[in-house]
């Protein structure tokens, strides 16, 4: 099946930087969307940054200008560079991919990685 291996995350003070990486593997034919969502305690999961595969990346308004998503199609991976982090960025971050597999488009999620920003 499709596996997502996430790395990065951790704890940092406000104003600091972190980098999250995610690599997808499995018997899929192609990847469409790939990126990151996050979920803070007591809140719904929300989009952070997702690349559509056509060169377009959609960012949450709250992270524009601070976060940058890069995608490596050769390695089926994405990296989220997070700068100028704020306490409100504290959340569990989930990698997500949309792939074509078994004659259907399916969505998969990573197990999540914790990002904690202290003031």
Image (tube, rainbow, N blue to C red):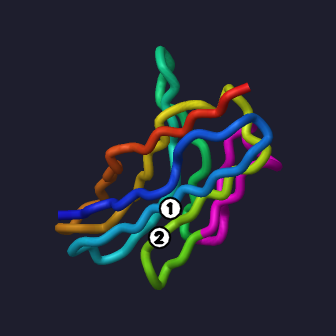
Dot 1, how many residues are within 10 Å of its Cα: few (below 14), some (14-19), or many (20+)?
Answer: many
Mark 2 vs 1: CB contact within 8 A: yes
Q: Quadrant of residue 80?
A: bottom right
Q: Is residue 105 above or below residue 116?
A: below
Secondary element at tag 2 = strand
Reply above or below: 5 against 40.
Answer: below
| Front position in the image: 40 or 87 | 87
**Badge 2: how crowded within 10 Å, few (<14), some, or many (20+)?**
many
Q: Residue at x 35, y 61 (%)?
A: 5
Give percent across and percent down for residue 37: 51, 42
Query: Circle 2 sits on which residue?
Result: 77
Tell me where the magenta segment starts and ends, as one range: 54-70
Name the side, left or right, on which 79 lies relative to 28. Answer: right
Question: Is residue 73 one of those drawn in magenta?
Answer: no
Question: Mark 2 to mark 1: distance in Å?
Answer: 7 Å
Residue in the image at 64% along x and 52% along y: 18
Q: Check the picture and name the quadrant holding the N terminus.
A: bottom left
Which of the labelled discs sits on residue 85, or is there none? none
| Residue at the spot 41% in from the left edge and 57% down from the top edge | 6
Q: Is residue 64 magenta?
A: yes
Residue behind mark 1: 21
């Amino acid at each position: 099946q499709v596996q997502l291996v996430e790395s990065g995350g951790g704890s940092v003070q406000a104003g600091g930087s972190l980098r999250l990486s995610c690599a997808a593997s499995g018997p899929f034919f192609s990847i469409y969307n790939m990126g990151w969502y996050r979920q803070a305690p007591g809140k719904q999961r929300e989009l952070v940054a997702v690349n559509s595969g056509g060169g377009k990346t959609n960012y949450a308004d709250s992270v524009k200008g601070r976060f940058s998503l890069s995608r490596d199609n050769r390695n089926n991976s994405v990296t989220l560079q997070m700068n100028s982090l704020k306490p409100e960025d504290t959340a569990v971050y989930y990698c997500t991919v949309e792939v074509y597999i078994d004659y259907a488009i399916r969505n998969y999620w990573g197990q999540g990685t914790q990002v904690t920003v202290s003031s």
